[in-house]
Amino acid sequence: MSSARGLVARDLRVAVENKEILKGIDLTVEPGKVHALMGPNGSGKSTLAFTLAGHPGYQVLGGSASLDGESLLELSPDKRAKAGLFLSFQYPAAIPGVSVANFIRTARQAVRPDDLTPAKFRKLVFEKLDTLDMDPAFLGRYVNDGFSGGEKKRLEMLQLAILAPKYAVLDETDSGLDVDALQSVGKSVNALRASDEGKEIGFLVITHYPRILRHIPADVVHVLIDGRIVKTGGPELAEEIERDGYDGVRDASASAAQAEAAAARV
Amino acid sequence: MSSGVGETLAALAFAPDGETLESAVALLASNPDAGGANDAALRREALARYAELPAPGMRPGRNWKHDYDKLRFEELVWTSDRRTVETVPFGAPAHDADPEADRPALATENAGGLVHLGATLLEPEDAARGSIAAGAGRRGVVVATLADSVRDRAQLLDGVKNAIVDWRADRFAALAAAFQNCGAFVYVPDGVQLDAPIQLIFASSAAQDEAVFPHVVVVLGANARATVLERHVGEGDPFVCGIVEAHVGEGAQLDYAVVQQASEAARIIFSRGARCERDAQVRWHLAELGGALARTVLDAHLDAPGARAETSALFFNTAMQHVDLASGADHAVGPTTSDTVVRSAATDRGQGRYVGNIVIRPKAHGSDASLRDDALILGTRAHVDSIPALEIAANDVKAFHGATVGSLDEEALFYAGSRGIARAQALRLITLGFFEPVVARFPSEALRDEIRTALDRKIDDATEIDG
């Protein structure tokens, strides 16, 4: 296993219900960098997110995934989180009867046992609530139970800020958000990245639309189509997609594949 | 010091038959001081009904007949309301339990209470505080044995005792009426509002062989307010079969909480009913945590406009526990309101049944009834039946019911896992959260925490929790 730092996937192939969705993903998210993973619906973006986090419904066919050299694939979801991985869910599950305060306290305690006094933890929570324009009354509500789409995403960002992982995968965090909520999300992520505990976090921002990248600027943009990363570039790639859609990239990659196949036949 | 007044009566070998009943009646007649709250004629009629009525074990759902058929009475004896001559610290039943074990703590904030060990009333160390706090007593509040109250305050019981729970319609209520041998009376006069709860404790000891047939009567006058906390604790394998009747006067509010933490071999069967006058409110809270076999009927009779019932109940069956729960909200007139929330879980060989009845009678126009019942199955051999039944005979009413039976939400477990929370801990968190809508309605934070702790301990004790 490589000891290089980074959230790394190597030739990662994944099936869901025996259908191969990811057909060999190679990706390295370095500490402190923002990588965007863009692609049309059904391309396998969320599959990558769930596979990295260890969802039992995703079957790894081959390849590897590691976090700062530690192999992830053998670990249970909670051990991946303890290793420093955080997944912000597109559709976070509700946990009725469990208050947000209790949940985030339990999570912080699991990931970083006893590193903060209760008073300091409380101070941290209130700071982060403020950054996210969240009412402290949120803490007394049950986790995601009856939350609006925007409230769910804010709660994901609150947990991201409080857990301060090594690597964060944000799965479609922009979906279903209005402009104000999107701005709050951007502000929160940027405040975290500007802080001492957050400046080394590597981000994998999974999105269909480029608009979130205006709030969280990406260093590297990957385009995922049909289970493969077909193109990698700088921020300008996101602009290209905004202008031409995925069809332009798809056509280019299809003709490249055809050329490759033709070359192989020769 | 002790103020024990009763003679210890001879004990009869108990059997639910006429011979035993006649011996019991003769015993009561021979010592009027010991007192039986029910008269001989009523006892005989009740026993006849017991013999006629079927056990509540038939369908719907899993057949419970076996549970009730296998109830054994051979080892039991019957005695009447005896009083012990020993003094005990109030709230600490004098039995041989581990001194470190949880005690039902009756602290000074109680407005009053009674402690029974089996069918025997324990005299509190501080009689004035034990039976009734001085301040509450001055305001006319009564907390006394039912037998004393029948003798001394019969007019207060008139139209309430044996008038709310229909023992003619339920086999075990009939048995309780026939052999009633202890009980309590709580009376809160018009306009008196008690902040502190009145606690009624029923304890058992490992050596106990008394069959216990309690009868609790609660009367709240107009605009009165009170909380009654009924607890079941102890050891051994007691058989307890009782009746609780509550009359809630106009504009009054009664919180009646039951925390059943009887021993794991206990058989404990209760019929409880409340009748609400105009604008009165009853709030039933029930936590069935202990016992091998527990059956509860929890009824609310909404007899006048503006009456409201809130019924919250939970059970969590582990090991071999069987809990059979039936709630009823009877909207006799309109507009009246009922709101029922039930949460149940089972694992190991736990078996449960919940039957939720809502009746909206023809005159109950404008009534609003809601019934929400969710069951969580945590083990492959556990089982819970959930049977809501709505009978609506009035127009212009709102009635809602929803029921689910399911297992733990894997997506929620994964979500918690992704935040670093290990599966066992996530499971505990989610399971405790499942009960929270019922726990949150219990009338004090201390009680809520106590129930949460008890549920948490049940999770520890369960062998199969991640099916």
Image (cartoon, helix red, strand yellow):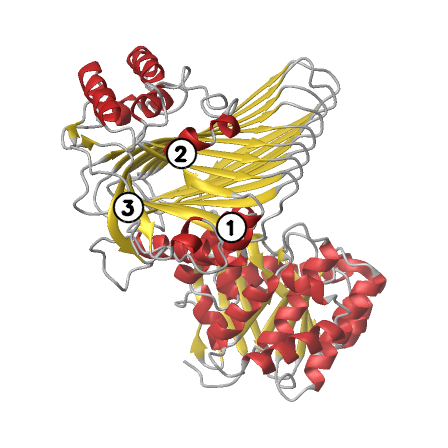
The image shows residue B8 at horizontal and vertical percentages of 20, 38
Q: Residue B427 versus residue B357: which sits nearer the camera?
A: B357
As measured in the structure, the alpha-carbon distance from the residue carrying label 1 to the one carrying label 2 is 19 Å
Q: Earlier in the sequence, mark 1 or mark 2?
A: 2
Q: Residue furthest bottom?
A: A196
SS class, disc 3: loop
Per the image, the residue denoted by label 1 is B197
Mark linked to residue B4:
3
As measured in the structure, the alpha-carbon distance from the residue carrying label 1 to the one carrying label 3 is 25 Å
- Quarter-of-image position of residue A25: bottom right
As measured in the structure, the alpha-carbon distance from the residue carrying label 2 to the one carrying label 3 is 16 Å
| Residue drawn at point x = 49 percent, y = 21 percent | B163
Q: Earlier in the sequence, mark 1 or mark 3?
A: 3
Q: Quadrant of the N terminus of chain A?
A: bottom left
In this rendering, do the residues under marks 1 and 2 share a single chain? yes
The image shows residue B437 at horizontal and vertical percentages of 56, 47
Residue A188 visible? The answer is yes
Q: Earlier in the sequence, mark 2 or mark 3?
A: 3
- Quarter-of-image position of residue B302: top right
Q: Tell me if label 1 and label 3 are in contact, CB under 8 Å.
A: no
Output the chain of dot 2: B
Per the image, the residue denoted by label 2 is B146
In this rendering, do the residues under marks 2 and 3 share a single chain? yes
Tag 3: residue type? Gly
Q: Quadrant of the C terminus of chain A?
A: bottom right
Output the chain of dot 1: B
Tag 2: residue type? Leu
Q: Residues within 10 Å of mark 1 (few under 14, many from 20)?
A: many
The image shows residue B298 at horizontal and vertical percentages of 48, 31
Please say if B369 is above or below B380. Answer: above
